[in-house]
Amino acid sequence: MSGIVGVVQRVDRCVDPDLPARMLERLPWRRIDGAAAWAQGPAGLGHGRFATCPEALHEKLLLANNTGTAVLTADARIDNRNELSAALFGGSSPHREITDGELILAAWEKWGEDCAGHLLGDFAFAIWDATRRRLFCARDHSGVHPLVYYASPDLFAFASEIGALWAVPGIPRRLNETRVADFLAAFYEDKSATFYRDIYRLPPAHILTATTDNVTVRRYWALDPTRELRLPTDRDYVEHFRATFTEAVRCRTHCQAPVAAELSGGLDSSSIACVARRALREGRGRELHTITAVFPSLADDHPHLDDGRYVSQVTGLDGVIPHEVQVDNLNPLNRALGSLDEHLNIPNLFMFQEFFARAAGQGARVLLSGHDGDSTVSNGLEYLRWLARSGRWPRLWSEASALARAQGGRRRAALWFCWVHGLRPAIPDFARNAWRFTMRRPKSGVQYFRGVIRQDFARRTGLEERLAGLASEPLGGKPTIRDGHLAAITSGLHLCAMEGSNALASRAGVEHRYPFYDRRLIELCLALPLSLILRGGRTRHIFREAMTGMVPQGILDRLDKTDMSANFCYRLLAAGRPAIERFLYTEPDLIAPYVDLESVRGAWERFQSDPFRRISDSMRVYFAASLGVWLNEMDL
């Protein structure tokens, strides 16, 4: 969660030596442990340090190689430290522990632009190569650590956050209406665009090279949906999964300060908390803080929000210090979310501000999150599709019936599982297209969020064409049975949620870490045999088996998840009302060019009449009003 910045003049001109420091001044929350700036000739770099790992305490803020021809700035936590040390430094034992920056710079000197593929962990870094007058940048495989940039014929500039770029003279601050249209359509798959024209994100798993002539961006890593892991026995799979998941969590507890973990009582957060608790106790005998959301005002009308019976099974263990955060008194449209560089329409993100504040109040610098666990460790429903395509009808019916029983349903529910997750997805594309032609039905393509965006604005920004283009592009080339799993793991929605959380967490002085984004775990889960993920109506079977003995059995047997939409609806109706009525009625000019006001006003009226059953209307209202809050704060 350190801050990195840099500028390269692409014409025959020296960089202003004070510019990197001015850029860092705009990111005070990312330099609470010190800052350093460097400039020489056409290039300047800056590093603001937020130390979490022990090695960072003696790390140089800007690191140069032995010849002084390469300078590095990095926001990184490298997890495969032992393997890299052996490959890069041999059997030598340095007089002090090697820092992450030294590992990255040595990897670059050994492997050049291929270095990022050798790194495990979360990182964003830049290296100025004075010999070749080129800047090399890289971002981790899932995009946990951010990197944004601006390029023109005269200069190239990058930073951890867009706000730092405004310190650079000549960088325009202009709204990117295409991005506005995408967000109003709930379309997140453009992973390079930002809300500002000419400012871009470096996508996850990509590297960038900037020279005086051009800027090139290319992917260095991608998941392979055709790969399937083969091990001798089911027990071997379970043990391999347990070891991989345990290591993913252990790496993210690496911190010299206290560590906290979100705890909802679900399988994902409980597994992380239990494994982290064990890792901390075995390491230096430390305790784990847990942060749990509670909803006291909704307890009577919405008892399903009370997960205390599950949470207490974890917080009752030795070495756990529990904390509760009341979130039924917060505002989903608060101004703090509007003051961020980018607009965020992530509904429950408002709760995480309180999580970060509580973790920081306990002295924690790391907060572990179970975000995206359901995507990484799939529920296995694609197994039904595979059974249907393979003609294994008895097994398909058996698994669908078991799923129905596990969720309290009967024969009709089993038929639904067979059709929706088995037979319908297994129908070949040519057959579905022929049916549409015969019935004179147009191909649906991707449907955007109708009822929010103005249709003329959607047409002007080419929204329909972009969405249709996305629908026609396979993710991994030849279609496979795992394409749905791959799409879930690589969803742009998760990237936006992470980037929003990163911005909020950094301002609170906390680093958000995600064990389910561990590259080794992601690669393993996508390669598992489908029969190990769904078995006997038990979704995520291998995960539950692997956590047996580590996570309380009551949580392993739990098949449901808490739906927090009631709290969101309640708070939007109560605390969000002033902002909603302001931007829909009294001051609609900010959003009127983009939002279908008549439609959203209708959604607001319907939502007020029956808030807890009008989820789709609540989202329409939220999308429109949250855009108004952000535009008002940004004053674009």
Image (cartoon, grey):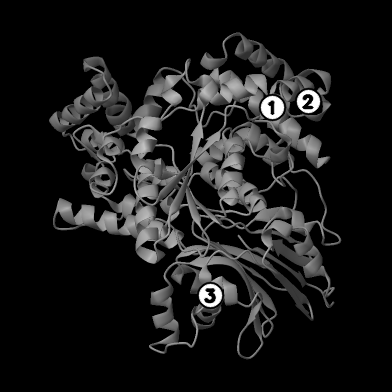
Residue 41 vertical placement versus 427 (above, below): below
Q: Nearer the viewer, residue 326 or 111?
A: 326
User: Which residue matches tag 1?
Assistant: 624
Q: Nearer the viewer, mark 3 or mark 2?
A: 3
**Disc 2 residue crowd, few under 14, some 14–19, many 20+, Cα 10 Å:** some
**Disc 1 residue crowd, few under 14, some 14–19, many 20+, Cα 10 Å:** many
Q: Nearer the viewer, residue 44 or 578?
A: 578
Question: In the displayed structure, does residue 375 sit left or right of residue 617?
Answer: left
- For mark 3, give the secondary structure: helix
Residue shown at the point (56%, 75%) measured from the top left: 101
Residue shown at the point (85%, 77%) measured from the top left: 13
User: Which residue matches tag 2?
Assistant: 592
- For mark 2, give the secondary structure: loop
Three-letter amino acid code of the residue under disc 1: Ala
Image position, residue 302 (x, y; %):
46, 19
Residue 407, quarter of the rendered image: top left
Residue 105 vertical placement versus 416 (above, below): below
Image position, residue 503 (x, y; %):
64, 50
Task: Judge whether residue 228 can be spotted in this image.
Answer: no
Three-letter amino acid code of the residue under disc 3: Ile
Q: Nearer the viewer, mark 2 or mark 1?
A: 1
Residue 481, quarter of the rendered image: top left
Q: CA distance from mark 2 to mark 1?
A: 10 Å
- For mark 1, give the secondary structure: helix
User: Looking at the image, is mark 3 or mark 2 earlier in the sequence?
Assistant: 3
Three-letter amino acid code of the residue under disc 2: Ala
Q: Which mark is residue 104?
A: 3
User: Looking at the image, is mark 3 or mark 1 earlier in the sequence?
Assistant: 3
Q: Please say if the residues under marks 2 and 1 sit with CB atoms less than 8 Å apart.
A: no
